């Protein structure tokens, strides 16, 4: 995903004729299950026994 690319490869930025490689890291993302799965590259299908990965509530 794009977040992995920014963390591992980074981007090149030129400032004052010097090229610097900038890397990014993400600390926290808050959202609903579908949004988080989409952003983080997880499966966006919720055909499973547990719709929530935190509370393990059964459907």
Image (cartoon, rainbow, N blue to C red):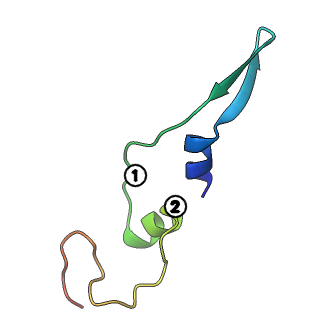
User: Which quadrant holds residue 15?
Assistant: top right
Q: Quadrant of the N terminus?
A: bottom right
N-terminal-most mark, 2 or 1: 1
Front-lying residue, 9 or 33: 9
Q: How many labels, in total?
A: 2
What residue is shown with label 1?
29
Front-lying residue, 36 or 14: 14
Q: Position of residue 37 (x, y in %)?
A: 46, 68
Q: Is residue 50 left or right of residue 25?
A: left
Front-lying residue, 5 or 44: 5
What numbered label is drawn on residue 57? none
Q: Is residue 53 left or right of residue 33?
A: left
Q: Position of residue 36 (x, y in %)?
A: 43, 64
Q: Position of residue 41 (x, y in %)?
A: 52, 66
x 40%, y 52%: residue: 29
What numbered label is drawn on residue 39? 2
Count residues near mark 1 (Cα–Cα under 10 Å), then give few for <14, some for 14-19, many for 20+.
Answer: few
Above-or-below relation of 55 to 10? below
Q: Is residue 16 left or right of residue 35?
A: right
x 38%, y 60%: residue: 31
For marks 2 and 1, give the CA distance: 9 Å
Q: Are marks 2 and 1 in contact (CB under 8 Å)?
A: yes
x 34%, y 89%: residue: 48
Q: Quadrant of the C terminus?
A: bottom left
């Amino acid at each position: 995903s794009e977040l992995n690319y920014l963390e591992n490869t980074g981007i090149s930025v030129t400032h004052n004729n010097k090229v610097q490689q900038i890397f990014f890291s993400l600390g926290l993302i808050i959202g609903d299950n579908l949004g988080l799965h989409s952003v983080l590259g997880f499966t966006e299908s919720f055909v499973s026994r547990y719709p929530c990965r935190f509370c393990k509530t059964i459907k």
